[in-house]
Structure formats: structure tokens, C-alpha cells
Image (cartoon, grey):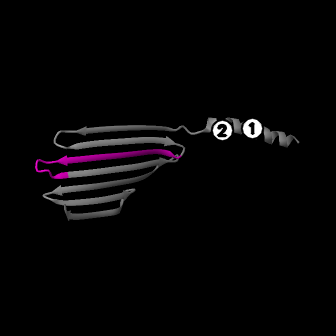
Amino acid sequence: MNKTYILLASVAAFTLSAPAFAADESMKTETKIEKDSKGNYDEKDKTVTKDASGKTVDEKKVDVDVDAKGNTDKTVKTKHVHSKGLLHKKDKVTTMDTEKTKDGQMTTTHEKKVDGKTVESTTETAPK
């Protein structure tokens, strides 16, 4: 009988204290955009999220350059880093996509790296 009361008291104490053990959650986002009259464009986005699974940082950079002839150079870079655990093990995924147009010919590239190792890489050239 005493074991039942002790067990019941333990379960009640744990249930009532569970919110005290809840992980802190937060999210912060920053965006910066610059544009000029020639059509050049820069954008930087960064989001930091913290929750029970760890800390995640997502970054995106967009750069568009236009020359006097109308040739364009577009680059989009992304980075996703997730830190988890007491030892702060990190998982990192980066991508880079480019599109270059010069004299009516367009060249596109795509590259994806996971933890520093290239897992995707393509280049294509076609008339515009």
C-alpha cells in the first residue's frame, strides 16, 4: 500500500514539474536587400532556430549582376547547419546555383555539398 502512494506521489510530482524541463525555443530572422538602378541586386537572409533538437542556422545569399550589354550573372548560395547534442555535432548542407547569360548563351551550374563532400554537380550550356 505504501508503495502505491509513493509511486502515485512520484508520478504527480513529475507531471507537475514537466514544464520546468521543457526546452527553450526561439527563432530569429534577418533580411538585407540592396538594389541599384542598373539592375544589380543583393539579398541576404539568415534564420536561427533553437529548440529541443538543437540549433539550426539557415542562410541564403542571392547576387545578381547586370552589365551594360545586358549580360547577367546570377548566384544563389544556401547553407543549412544543424548543431545537436552535448558535443555540438554539426550537419552541414550547402548549395550553389549560378546562371550566367552572355551574348545570348546561358550557362547554369548546380553544386550541393553535404558535410563538405560534393554529392551533386551539374553544368549546362544552352542558347537563350
Residue 56 part of the magenta-drawn span: yes
Residue positioned 40% across, 56% down in the render: 115
Left or right of residue 27, residue 30 in this image:
left
> Tag on residue 85?
none
Q: In which quarter of the image is residue 20?
A: top right
Quarter occupied by the N terminus = top right
Q: How far, Cα to Cα, is label 1 from label 2?
A: 10 Å
Magenta-highlighted residues: 53-72
Residue positioned 17% across, 39% down in the render: 37
Residue in the foreground of this view, choosing between 90 and 106: 106
Query: Could you tell me which secondary element the residue under label 2 belongs to?
Result: helix
Residue positioned 81% across, 39% down in the render: 6
Q: Which amino acid does label 2 sit on?
A: Ala
> Tag on residue 12?
1
Query: Could you tell me which secondary element the residue under label 1 belongs to?
Result: helix
Left or right of residue 67, residue 61 in this image:
right
Residue positioned 35% across, 58% down in the render: 112
Left or right of residue 117, residue 3 in this image:
right
Q: Main secondary structure of the magenta part?
A: strand
Residue placed farthest to the front in the image? 128
Residue 72 % position (x, y): 18, 51
> Tag on residue 18?
2
Residue 114 % position (x, y): 39, 57
Q: Quadrant of residue 33?
A: top left
Residue 53 % position (x, y): 53, 47
Residue 93 % position (x, y): 39, 54
Q: What residue type is labelled 1?
A: Ala
Residue 66 part of the magenta-drawn span: yes
